[in-house]
Image: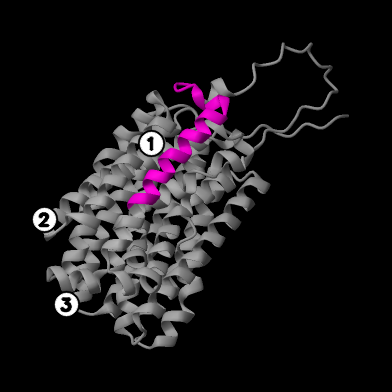
Amino acid sequence: MVGLLAPLLPAIVASILPVFLIGALVGPMGSEFGYRETTAGWLMASFFAVSALVSRRAGSIADSVGPVRTLQVGLSGSAVTGATMATIADSVPVLAVAMMVGGGCNALTQIAANVYLARYLPPARHGVAFSIKQSANPGGVLVAGLLLPTLVLTTGWRSAFGVASGAALAAALGLEAVRRWHPGLRVANRRPADAMPAPAPAAKPAPASAAIPAPGPAASLPTPASPRKDRTLGLVAAAAGFGSASAVALGGFYVESARDAGVGLAAAGLAASLGSATSIVGRIVAGVRADRTGASPERILGWVAAMLAVGAVALIGFGLRTPWAQWLALPGAYGIGWAWPGVFNLAVVRARPDEPGRATGVSQTGIYVGTTLGPLIFGPVSESLGYPLTWSTAALLALISAAGMLAARRDLERSAPATPPRVTQA
């Protein structure tokens, strides 16, 4: 499992890093190009808007062409995006075009990574695998935060995008090495069912007194696509959209908010990195728990709702304009409130194991719609009305998302087949 996951995390970090750099570098980039938070919000929104448009198609491409090739195409485009920002970007329109290209490539990478995990890793490890994969997003914030004191303040903001470009290219080459090393990855069109061992010959009927195994968590999973299941998937996607819109404030506006509250640029970057590290830990812990308990999609959505509710309380803490509040609210906002995406994707895949690419393509579309609208809301609010209202708005969106997750959970429970009674040996 480690060998298969090793190239995936840097791949996703590289694909998402450009948009988080736009948020973290509002100060130096805005000084050069003459813009503030509102324009930065539009640039981030252009990235996620194209990601939303491409996501559903990306799922079909990854299902048919194969996740490894799709990942490599997406990463190649991300490398071009970073190189453009590092070298020839000389105006806001050029920045916007580069962000749109990067957004489309990010969608290919994210969705292909979901298919990669669903196809090549055993279901018993999906919880931790999806959590590690989703840790790449706060990983992008972590890297962006570390680049501020270590590189940007000494060599300029363009060097950060140069690092992003090189990371994307290195990740694409790393995936090629893994593809050549791992025989299973050479089969482009293999689906999850093809990766499983052939079924054993039918056993002779057991006597009536024999134990009948109780169904595992899969007993509560929805059956193949139906209008009701598609409606539930749409509800899940909408709820995720509100949650991701709230999270954009952390990924894109925390550094400037902390500076506005009296924290220095280098310290604000380190704080964002620390918060992202707690988010990564929270995601992995949630994924391990999901694997150990074999949690059903319904149960996982309950966890997600609880995480979002706790995060909403912590987000309000950022609205207190004192340096200490910017540090104290970090664990709750990042480590709990932004720890849900990994197990969320796991819930979607467990609910639709027959078509993980299409299912996560729909749910990811909701996420990208949220991440598109979030910057368009938070940019003008931060610039015109102040950061306290920004964080209050983010908290409200998180609570709406939590309510949506609970509604989707109830919908899944109503549509799940009844669990047969457990029969034990006489």
The quadrant holding residue 361 is top left
What stretch of residues is rendered in magenta?
Answer: 165-191
The one nearer the camera, 171 or 346, is 171
Q: Residue at x 47, y 51 (%)?
A: 134
Which one is earlier in the sequence, the residue at label 3 or at label 1? Answer: 1
Q: For the C terminus, which image quadrant?
A: top right
The residue that disc 1 covers is 72
- Residue 391 versus residue 419 in the image, above or below: below
Q: Position of residue 13 (x, y in %)?
A: 41, 52
Q: Is residue 345 left or right of residue 254?
A: right
- Real-space Cα separation, disc 3 to disc 2, in angstroms: 23 Å
The residue that disc 2 covers is 93
The residue that disc 3 covers is 384
Q: Which amino acid is tagged 1?
A: Gln
Q: Residue at x 66, y 36 (%)?
A: 216
CB within 8 Å, label 3 to label 1: no
- Neighbor class of circle 3 (other Cα within 10 Å; few <14, some 14-19, many 20+) is few
- Residue 234 versus residue 399 in the image, above or below: above
Q: Position of residue 189 (x, y in %)?
A: 45, 21
Q: Which amino acid is tagged 3?
A: Ser
Is 280 a magenta residue?
no
Is any atom of residue 336 visible in this view? no
The quadrant holding residue 105 is top left
